[in-house]
Image: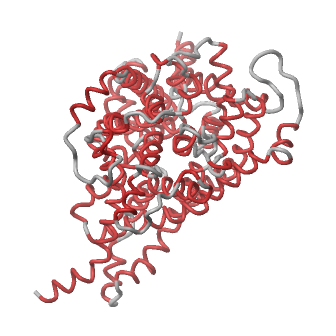
Amino acid sequence: MQRLEKRCRKLTPYFFILPFFAAYLLFSVFPFAFAFFMSFTDWTGVGTPSFVGLGNYIRIFTQDAAAQKSFLNTFYFLVIAIPIEILLGLLTAMIIKDFVPKARGAFQLLNFLPYLTAPVAVGLIFQFLFDWDYGTVNQLLASIHIENDHIYWLGTEGTARFVVIVVIIWRLFGYSMIILSAGLSTISEDLYEAADLDGAGWFQKQLRITLPLLKPILGFVCVISLINGFQLFDDPYMLFASQAGQPFGGPNNSVLTVMMNMFQASFMNFQMGYGASIAYTLFLIIFIFSMLLTRMMRREDC
Amino acid sequence: MKSKVFRTLRRAPAYLLLLFTTVLALMPFYIMFIMGTYKNEDIFKGLKLLPGNYIAKNFETILQGNVIRPYLNSLFISVLSMIVCVLVSSLIGYGMSKFRFRGKKFLMTVLLATLVMPYQISMAGYMMEMRWFQLNNTLWPMILVFIANPFGAFWMTQYIGSAIPDSIIESARIDGSGELRLFLTIVFPMIKPATITLALLVFLWSWNNFLIPLVFVTDPRQYTLPIFISTLGGAYRVDYAAKMLNLTLATIPVLIFFSIFSKYLIKGMTIGAVKE
């Protein structure tokens, strides 16, 4: 009798973790593994799949110019947008902490609102702001007589990319600000007071004290921004894909991101197998970056 | 007196930069709102920076469309995802933090490794699975994906591990409380701050989720709010003013909701970045 009870006790923890791992196996691990299997086939989603080995992956890197361009585009966006976004977030966080400490919560929230907004909605708002005809940006430029000819923002390659970068920065800098603010609050005030005694100015204090101490968190924000940035889909999709006369990836595929390319292959052209191989190529990249991330987090532990 | 003026002057660049980012952050929302208050034809006639007086008429136009349904669908999906995810996460959090068992370390490593892995990667596999279950063209694919959330599990494990003293659990056990009752009546009420944070995060993710409904939803009766917004993008030059008012109504109420609880949200988002 007692032994039975003891055995029951032993099973208790499994009872608590069961719902999670059951759902995890069913709705995360299985689709994940199955997509991996699909990436080696030419499956369209119906009929029987036939194996093509590494064919899909080879196709990405040797034949599919659009796919290659989508990887380059995504890198390009991130390399330009993330440093600006983080710098803006950092400056905002520092200023809020040192100059308006009483209104801290309010300013943090206001700058954070873009991040909370549905990216689809963000895409639509910016589609409106940058419309060549009635868009606010062009009307603003016209009203101060800088540019009387309406700029076709979303219609040419360079400007289309510019708009996407603006959208990324706008939506994400508040996130960096929030994370970096949390980092700033862990730095001891004593350090700044000591620097004050030495007669250091604000800029010097930020440069000599804040930046070095914030390095690990800056790295964290950087890697998280990259991992999230690789999945860029909603806003560029909304900016271009839904517009009349615009090709799916914007003018000349100049804003086609990897996720957009995956979506197009899998769910518009029904090349499910090929789409899965695009997703897994991206997975490999994200995997490398998340290894970096876990290593950084671990170092912080000690 | 003089030094105070001098100090403010010296600080001016900082204030200006903060003002700049704040205005930058709010401007698109403001313009979206303003455009919704004008007559469509007037939008094309030059820059508008002050509200117009056509909002009631635009509102009438909107009500002719199908606005309520997407809102209710999104609400249903997000609330259900939130409840199930919080419950499942607290259960595993309790199991992982307060028990010793075989395989625990391995499971924890798996959780950590998949913490930042996006589910979008497995979209094609998920699509096929839902087809086999005959759940495509229902709202379920949008809910099921949030049940087992590695972040939720991780967050709850950490929180319960540090917030619930072992002695409380021990004494409840000595009193003869069953394990499930112990969890529901003692542990769960004690972890309220963590459940609120997780609930808000799941609600946010689910509410803004776009890719999954884009893949699965074809029937307009199952439109979620983001899908509805994407149809507003539309191919035709229709009523832009009504479109913008529609967008305002789709975004602003939920932003106000998040603002009220922003403290909890921010707490959840900064976890992992900073050890407290």
Residue farthest toward the top in the current orientation of the protein: A1
Quarter of the image for residue B185 reads: top left
Q: Could you say where residue B7 lies in the image, as x and y percent from the top left?
A: 22, 83
Pick the quarter of the image with the N terminus of chain B: bottom left
A134 relative to A34, above or below: below
Residue at 39% x, 64% y: name it: A186
Task: Depth check: give the residue in front, B206 or B156.
Answer: B206
Q: Residue at x 27, y 41 (%)?
A: B38
On screen, B16 above or below A167?
Answer: below
Write down the quadrant of residue B57 in the picture.
top left
Q: Nearer the viewer, residue A185 or B222?
A: B222
**Quarter occupied by the C terminus of chain B:** bottom left
Instruction: Find residue A115 and report its horizontal and vertical position in percent.
Output: 42, 48
Please count the marks in the image. Answer: 0
Asked whether B155 or A31 is in front, the reply is: A31
Q: Is residue A41 left or right of residue A300?
A: right
Residue B98 seen in render: no
Whether residue A91 sits left or right of residue A67 in the image: it is left
Q: Residue at x 53, y 39 (%)?
A: A243
Where residue A36 appears, x then y in whole percent?
Answer: 76, 32
Q: Is residue B265 left or right of residue A39?
A: left
